[in-house]
Amino acid sequence: MPITIDDTGQTVTLNPPYSPVTPDDDLQKITQVYFAKKTVTQNGANVAFTRIDSLHAQQVDGEDLAYDSILGKTVYLIIETENMATLSIDAVIRPSDQALTGNTDSLSLMKFNTRTQAYEVSRLLTAQVGNFDALNDRITAENPQGSHAHYTNLTDHQNKAIIKLQLRPSLILDFNTWARNIANAPNSIVNLEVAVERTDNEPCAYGPNSSEEVREAGIFLNSDALGRFRITNRKLFTIYHGNNRYNTFPATGTPARRRRVGKVLNAESTEVIFFYYDQYDNEHRVCARQVTVKNQKRKVATVPAVAQRGALVETIDFMPNRNAGESIDAYRLKVYANGTLGEGTGGNKWYANVGTDTVELIDMDILQNNGVGPQTFEAFNYNQNGVQIRYGFVHTRRRSIKPDSFAGFLGALAQFRQEGHTHYIVSQGFSYSDGSCYPSAEHVNGAAGDINLLNTAGDGNNTLLSNANYDYDDQVIFRNLLYDFGFLNARSERQSNTSNQSTADDTPVILPHSIETTTPRHNNHLHVHGFNPIRNIYE
């Protein structure tokens, strides 16, 4: 069957079927067409493509994923050929059935334009065999067209046509429609297939075992035997190392700073996945979390009478934790229909619901280590392919955070480790699972967190600004990374310390991007807040 497109309102058949043509010389062949993620090795020198489809399933925790990509995600379309050097190839991507759009017409998707460094809507995807512009890094003043010269093994890919694209339409209304249709499809998954042909309408063969050239399109990823490409709904965050040259988010402000985190919102999914792209642009699927929606909270001075609190929904008791040695200020939380009453060392405090406004929260305690006590509880330890993200909690059950802030937190920890710092990052808490944060006001809704100051042993144990083991130099680096990844504000104390290894804090000094705060004391932790909102991909 020939492929058709409809870019102008009229359906046009690109190549009508003809009888097979037996070539006189070497067979010109499109052997494989597949979706892939880029894989970079040799410290950024070698590039390869890891195929993703039902025959090359991705694994998480030793189990195959039931899908291959996500609506809105960036992927590469790879077209492998034989004896077709420098030839141009057309491709269209279309649903395998009517579940996604109500038909099987080719889809208008967002193709990356290397000249403008932007994704532009396109139905017909065209690429030249042996052209590597799709691998260009970011345009800079020194490199006004971008470059792929940093890859030294491009001859390995000289018989490939490469297209970089995002699996989404150009309009958010269409995105939402597609998302709803995916949610209603069997197993909430739809299949995409690819039709390809030569741009010059000359014949070629299709498939690795084909032996004759034909004047018609070849169809790939359209059967269980040959593999299917399956997409589903998820919310997703993309987090970039600061030295990643493929981060094309805009640089704004004075001085100009490039945004390091982006997101794709999807109302049809309660799961969010965080992807980190290291300095070489390798993709790391860091973790997936369930999103819960809670009433926004605001700390108010007056505790309302019982009659004004609404129905009691839940009581969370922290006395077993306190009795085991955890320094938790709250004795218990009583979650009512109109807010949360915190009972603790500072008396009763009321966290009122902010009307009907809601907030999305996720649980940061991924490992869910059992037990109570004053020890540090490891909450997460991602350690794969040169990237480690490790953190824990101590003396707190405030382990919920906004997804945006969590993305920034993950990015700062990942880059800190990749720059050679081995410190165990330990938090004294963000907010409780309901959005309250006894006894704080600023931690509400997972918007702020406390992090132990770094010590020279790197073990995460608590230290003071005045202690000899306080690691001021690395603390400055970590604070700057938290700022770069979105935590614009912080609270700490001004302190001089002549007993530690650093000389930079021998005179009174405060950490960068921080406000001096001594009431309450901030001499044993860094308090971060004021996270810079992340724009959705359609904003």
Image (cartoon, rainbow, N blue to C red):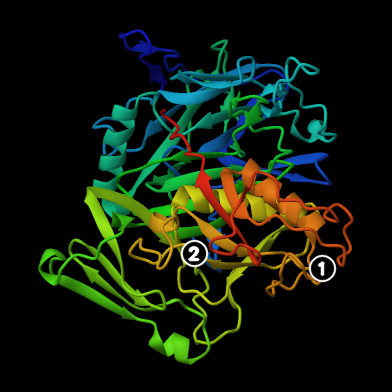
Q: Would you name the residue on which mark 1 appears?
A: 456
Q: Residue at x 55, y 43 (%)?
A: 238
Q: Quadrant of residue 462?
A: bottom right
Q: For the residue labelled by badge 2, is the local secondary structure a helix, a strand or a loop?
A: loop
Q: CB under 8 Å between callouts 2 and 1?
A: no
How many numbered discs? Answer: 2
Residue type (three-letter) at the residue carrying disc 1: Thr
Which is more N-terminal, label 1 or label 2? Answer: 2
- Using the image, tell me which numbered label, if any, was put on residue 464: none
Give the residue at the far left of this rendering: 307
Q: In which quadrant is the C terminus drawn?
A: top left
Location of residue 430 in the rendering, given as x and y in whole percent from the top left corner: 48, 62
- Res 264 seen here: yes
Q: Would you name the residue on which mark 2 appears?
A: 364
Q: Is residue 418 above or below residue 221?
A: below
Q: Nearer the viewer, residue 328 or 427?
A: 328
Point out the frontmost of discs 2 and 1.
1
Q: Residue at x 45, y 86 (%)?
A: 321
Location of residue 267 in the rendering, given as x and y in whole percent from the top left corner: 30, 44
Residue type (three-letter) at the residue carrying disc 2: Met
Q: Nearer the viewer, residue 323 or 212?
A: 323
Q: Is residue 395 above or below residue 248?
A: below
Q: Residues within 10 Å of mark 2 (few under 14, many from 20)?
A: many
Location of residue 52 in the rendering, given as x and y in whole percent from the top left corner: 55, 47
Q: Is residue 286 left or right of residue 457?
A: left
Gap between marks 2 and 1 measured at Cα: 26 Å
